[in-house]
Structure formats: C-alpha cells, structure tokens
Image: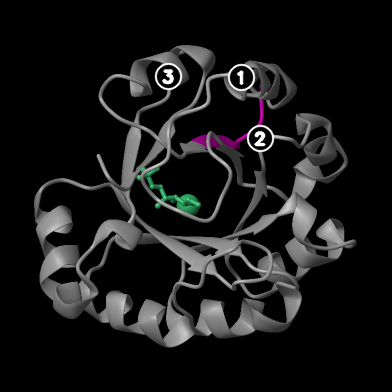
Amino acid sequence: MPSPSILVAPSVLAADFGRLTEEVRAVDKAGADWIHLDIMDGHFVPNISYGPEFVRAIRRSTDKFLDCHLMIAPADPYLAAFAEAGADILTVHAEAGPHLHRSLQTIRALGKKAGVAINPGTPESVVEPVLDLVDLVLVMTVNPGFGGQSFLSAPLEKVRRLRAMTAGRDILIEVDGGITPETAPEAAAAGATVFVAGSA
Ligand code: DX5
Ligand code: ZN
C-alpha cells in the first residue's frame, strides 16, 4: 500500500481578519491543501470566532477545500447554514451533543463530507459506532478554543489506535493544535495525514 499523502490545512484563526482575502489568497498560493476554519461559540469553547457569513467570504477568496471545524453546541441547527455558505467538510465534536449519529446523517444529507472531532479527554472509541458515516476524524492535540497553545503528545496514542480502527476504510485522520515543523513528524509517525497549522 502506498502511504497516504500529507495534507496541510492552515487555520484562518491565525489570519489578520482585516485583510482576510489577501491572507487566504497568500496561503492558497503558498501551497495550502485545505483551508481550516475554526467556528467557536463562546459556549462549547471559551472563545467566539466567526460564523457562516465569514465562511462565505472565504469561499469567494479561494477554490481550496474548506475544512470547517465546528466548536459549537448545539451544532445541528447551524449545519445547513455552514453547508450553504460553502464548507466542503463539516466536522462536529463528539462532545457537542447527545446525537452524534444524527448530526453526521444531517451533514451527509446536505451533500457534504462529515467529520468527528474528539477533545484530548475523549476516547477514540466514541467514533467506532459511527464509522460508516465518517470521512475524517479530527484528534485535538490541544484543548479547543485558542490558537498558539502547546502541543499535547498523549492524544497521538489515539491516532495510532484510530489508524488501526479505520484500516481499509476511506477515512482521514487529522491533528489540530500546536502543530509545528517539530511536532508534525511525531503526529505523522502516529498515522495522521491532515495537519492543521495556525500559529506555525
Ligand atoms: C484550536 C483550533 C485550531 C487552532 C490551531 O481550538 O481548533 O485549529 O487554529 O492553532 P495552532 O496551530 O496555533 O495551535
Ligand atoms: Zn481547528
């Protein structure tokens, strides 16, 4: 088996929002594979970022795959708005609501790729019952809410187990938080293939 290719997804959270279009075009031109969008509600995470209209503005700035990381609870009432704004994948947190299966069904019904994110304190086993509905698993390597935090290596054990759990399936494993040129190789060795980079 050829090893899966590596995808780099710069996070718009680290951009200068006053120069959004230029910033997105710069990472696009520099070779970004995806554009990572961090949606925060001040409730599921202790920070507020931006909503669907911001995603729509980014959609107008690039043709790249828009990787939409929803750190909001509940997520279900907003899935259609983010889909319509131009997201390509919608990733919901397993911790964000009682009906993960329903959230994933809704995303698929909207015609989008579906992802599940897990916090550092959440076991990867929550993903197992919904694997048929999942295109990507996002393993948080910091506690979500802010850019610029230090990388946690303990979640990489979950990446290793997820690699085995998803063997033979078309499911990507993404790491997010504190990814730098120093920490990315460790995450790649564990089996991650999509790398979010904000500060770095
Ligand atoms: C954190 C976000 C990340 C953030 C990463 O909650 O999910 O995507 O932008 O930023 P860095 O790479 O600085 O940790
Ligand atoms: Zn993120």
- Numbered tag placed on residue 120 in the rendering: 2
Can residue 2 be seen in the rendering of this structure? no
Percent across and percent down for residue 187 are 45, 21
In the figure, 90 relative to 166: above or below? below
Is residue 85 rendered magenta in the image?
A: no
Badge 3 marks a residue whose secondary structure is: helix
Report whether the residue tagged 3 is closer than 8 Å to ligand 1.
no
Q: Does the CB distance between marks 2 and 1 fall below 8 Å?
A: yes
Separation (CA) of disc 2 from disc 3: 17 Å
Can residue 69 be seen in the rendering of this structure? yes
**In terms of sequence position, does the residue under pointer 3 or pointer 1 come before the other?**
1
- From the viewer's perspective, tell me whether residue 19 is left or right of residue 147: left
Judging by the rendered image, the residue that carries numbered circle 1 is 154
Q: Amino acid at mark 1?
A: Ala
Task: Say how the picture is coloured.
Answer: one colour
Q: Which residues are magenta?
A: 168-174
The residue drawn where x is 53% and y is 38% is 142
Instruction: State the residue in front, 49 or 89.
Output: 49
- Numbered tag placed on residue 188 in the rendering: 3
Percent across and percent down for residue 58 are 29, 75
Separation (CA) of disc 2 from disc 1: 8 Å
**In terms of sequence position, does the residue under pointer 2 or pointer 3 come before the other?**
2
The residue drawn where x is 57% and y is 85% is 81
Badge 1 marks a residue whose secondary structure is: loop
In the figure, 56 relative to 44: above or below? below
Separation (CA) of disc 3 from disc 1: 14 Å
Percent across and percent down for residue 82 are 53, 78
Q: Amino acid at mark 3?
A: Ala
Is residue 171 rendered magenta in the image?
A: yes
Quarter of the picture containing the C terminus is: top left
